[in-house]
Amino acid sequence: MMDRRRVLSFLAVAGGLAWLRPSALFAASADELAGEGQAELTGGNVAKALVLLHEAESKDPRNDRVQALLGRAYFQQGDARTALTHFTRAVRLNPEDTLSRLLADTISQFPMPAAKVGSGREPSPSRSRPSRLAQDAKAEREALAKGAGKSTRQGPWRVLLDAGHGGLDAGAAVGGLREADVTLDLALRLARALAPARNEVIIHLTRTADVSLPGWARAGLAGFYGADLLVSLHAARVSDPAAMGIAAYGYGREPSDAQAALVARVENAAYGPGASWKSRGGEGLFLAAANNAVGQDRFARGLELARAFMRAMPAAAPLPTRVAGSAPLKLLEEADAPALLLETGFLSNADDAAALGSPDKRQALAQALADAFLAALRGVKMPPAAGRG
């Protein structure tokens, strides 16, 4: 009789849990719980997201994705202090987590109220001093501020290379080839090819691993790094059979041609949700903090650089040079610097896909891109240090 009562009690509890969350009947992993928590967070249900994410944390305290999502959840709830704690943990567990690092740096710029007594989150004595991450962020801001008053700058271009897609967003896929992998490989090869020209170009990358990075973060990184140019690498799959080879796009309110319209449709779909999502999650604060107040002239500047780059592409490049056009691309519109989107071939084209699937041809393509960028930048006047555009 006692065993039967215990069984009935267990079933009653399990039934209650299933009503709250059906998957609770099963031993969900930390990653599965994190996925559920992320879905609730994106939908605006912060309270339910926190329950799921703390359950995930109890299963795997060293899961960097869980820590990053907890940071987002607390930031969205308005608890910057606790958000900073989780973002910092995420970075310590995964130094490649660019987004958590950026949000930790951004939050640390603003004064935070002391934790309420009895809230369960009183600061420990060890947190009475700024963390090493906060100290590094402060030093970086001070270094940037020292040159802010100069109207002109002598020195290398600051270029931010963005490997499109990544993490949960694979981009286009053909056979076993993922666009996210192609763009990351090309970005790393291009950065290495440009490394000997450090007196002319300083390279930063939005990501150096297969991690998810929202569009708003890619756009804000340009201001964070004080970039003179943002270059986003892609290899889209579009419905136009004539789309092939290398194409560069600057921002334009209207697409310059039918292919540009197709590219904008594909890339904007991957960019992510719009302003309402950004403001809900606190990402608007990040964009405001990173923004360098560049003017609308950055659009003309980006298109000018796209055209200069295409003119400078070597004839020996492994893929043909096609067009320099303009398109209403969200990333280029929101970037804090002149920006261009580069289709390094189209995975919808069999010949392009074969070339992009070859390590030797990707290396040759990266070298051709490096040569073109150096030639293009040498022919364009260096931008001023402050208020670029």
Image (tube, rainbow, N blue to C red):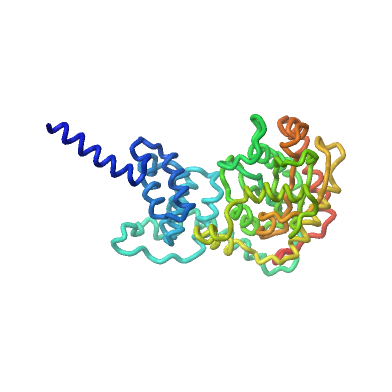
Please state the horizontal and vertical placement of residue 229, each as a whole percent of the image: 72, 55
Left of 347 or right of it: where is 31? left
Asked where in the image residue 32 lies, by quadrant, the reply is: top left
Foreground of the two, 105 or 155: 105
Q: How many badges with numbers are in the image?
A: 0
Name the quadrant of the C terminus.
bottom right
Please state the horizontal and vertical placement of residue 3, each as a whole percent of the image: 16, 31
Please state the horizontal and vertical placement of residue 57, each as a whole percent of the image: 38, 44
Left of 212 or right of it: where is 231? right
Residue for point 41% across, 56% down: 82
Foreground of the two, 166 or 373: 166
Asked where in the image residue 6 lies, by quadrant, the reply is: top left
Q: Please say if 360 is above or below 268.
A: above
Foreground of the two, 359 or 272: 272
Residue for point 74% across, 30% down: 354
Left of 27 or right of it: where is 382? right
Name the quadrant of the N terminus.
top left
Asked where in the image residue 367 lies, by quadrant, the reply is: top right
Residue for point 68% across, 69% down: 149
Is residue 165 visible to us here? Answer: yes
Left of 215 or right of it: where is 280? left
Foreground of the two, 325 or 164: 325
Q: Residue furthest left?
A: 1
Please state the horizontal and vertical placement of residue 76, each as a whole percent of the image: 46, 58
Q: Please say if 121 is above or below 53.
A: below
Is residue 245 visible to us here? Answer: no
Residue for point 73% across, 41% down: 239
